[in-house]
Amino acid sequence: MYKLGILVAVLVTVFMTLHMASSFFESVTTSSLADNIPFSNVLAPNPAKASGNLSVGVLQPARISYDEPAPGERVNGAIVVLVRNSELDGLRKSMRMFEDRFNRRFKYPYVLLNDQNFTQEFRDGIAAITKNEVRYGILDENYWNYSPSVTPEETENKLQVNKNRYLYGGSLSYRFMCRFQSGLFYKHPLVRTLDWYWRLEPDVEYYCDIDYDPFVFMRDNGIKYGFTIAPREGRRTVETLWNTTRTWIKANSHLLPERSLANWVMGTDGHYNLCHFWSNFEIVDLSLYRSEAYESYFNHLDASQGFFYERWGDAPVHSIAASLLLQKGEIHWFEDIGYKHPGNMHCPRDPAMHAKCVCDPGKAYTYRSACQTRFAKVNNMAKDRLMQILDSSEFEYRYNPAK
């Protein structure tokens, strides 16, 4: 009985305590919480809000908007993408990262180009990714077509010969793309009014916050070509490209500057070393491609059949031209922009740069690339020296199927 009495007393005490607590809290309204809770600065009105000053000890709500435009001027530029309807998911992935890392604040328009009409599903999918302006363009036969120097029949023969020799060896659309990107994209109505362009592709990744405008940086520093990754080209895809280029150089030396970075793509033996800027990422002052020299060079290549009978890519074409027509100070490696295209990636290893990135510098191809190392070491070459090397080192590469 004694234990039972103790138990009853405990229960009565608990009941009375809960009842008193309930009555207390019912009497405390939201408006009086600040008087009853010792941490009055949590809910008390903020006197600094009206004055515009911050007071020590007063918690401020986070007011971060990643869509707020970054200050500063903009150039007449755009983000240009060649894309198919079937690549919607890949482009959404690229744009999501590109928006988060850069364009949500800098708000450059996108120019999307396709050799087919864009579907409504595609347009809706892109509209869900960005609030920035998107301009859609179609490529007609003026842009997506054979070189005038080739025939469809002989092209098909070459596709059959090369289909197992290298990647895209049997692809006709890939050759249309390479020709278009080499010398026609900047003539499209949606691009020809631009002064600058930044190339974006589906299924690429951007690893680092870009808190400045690369367009403005290039303009203010006299830079015309920007890149991130510099690999070697597959030799079989460009078997006659350098010989064709040599022919053009000798006939058009008057179009070349007195000094250029020609020795980045050419050794002292006069051979092409296959180095090129990976053009799936490039930021370019379009006056380079619209120059008399580049137009002459592209027309010479287009008349030489290599875009279709071989598989000349836009990357080596752009790179050889930039090296022949620009000085080293006009070409810039964006080491601080971490980037991946299927096959290769770059991640900055400089601590200050890497602090803005989410990637592993140990996996970066760029720091192992011979072409990247060469770019850091070589300096400008005089035009007289270039011509001397070409005159003394005749060279023709012939494909030997036994090799």
Image (spheres, rainbow, N blue to C red):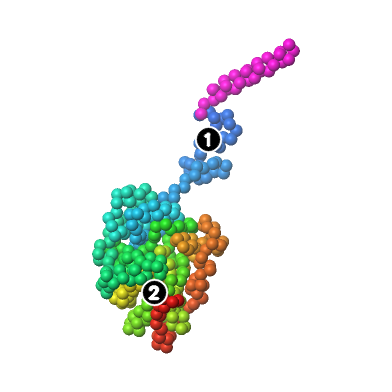
Q: CB of mark 1 within 8 Å of CB of mark 2?
A: no
Question: As drawn, is 198 to the left or to the right of 62?
Answer: left
Q: Amino acid at mark 1?
A: Leu
Closer-to-camera residue (304/289): 304
What is the distance, in whole Å, between disc 1 and disc 2 at their CAs? 70 Å
* Helix, strand or loop for the magenta stretch, by majority: helix
Residue 150: percent from left, percent from top? 27, 73
Q: Tell me the amino acid under the disc marked 2.
A: Val
* Disc 1 packing (10 Å; few <14; some 14–19; many ≥20): some
Q: Which residues are magenta?
A: 1-30
Quadrant housing residue 386: bottom left
**Left/right of residue 275 with respect to residue 191 in the rendered view:** right
Secondary structure of the residue carrying numbered label 2:
helix
Residue 105 in sight here: no
Judged from this view, the residue extending furthest toward the right is 2
Q: Which residue is mark 1?
A: 43
Give the residue pinned by disc 2.
Answer: 238
In the image, residue 128 sits, relative to residue 357, either above or below, namely above
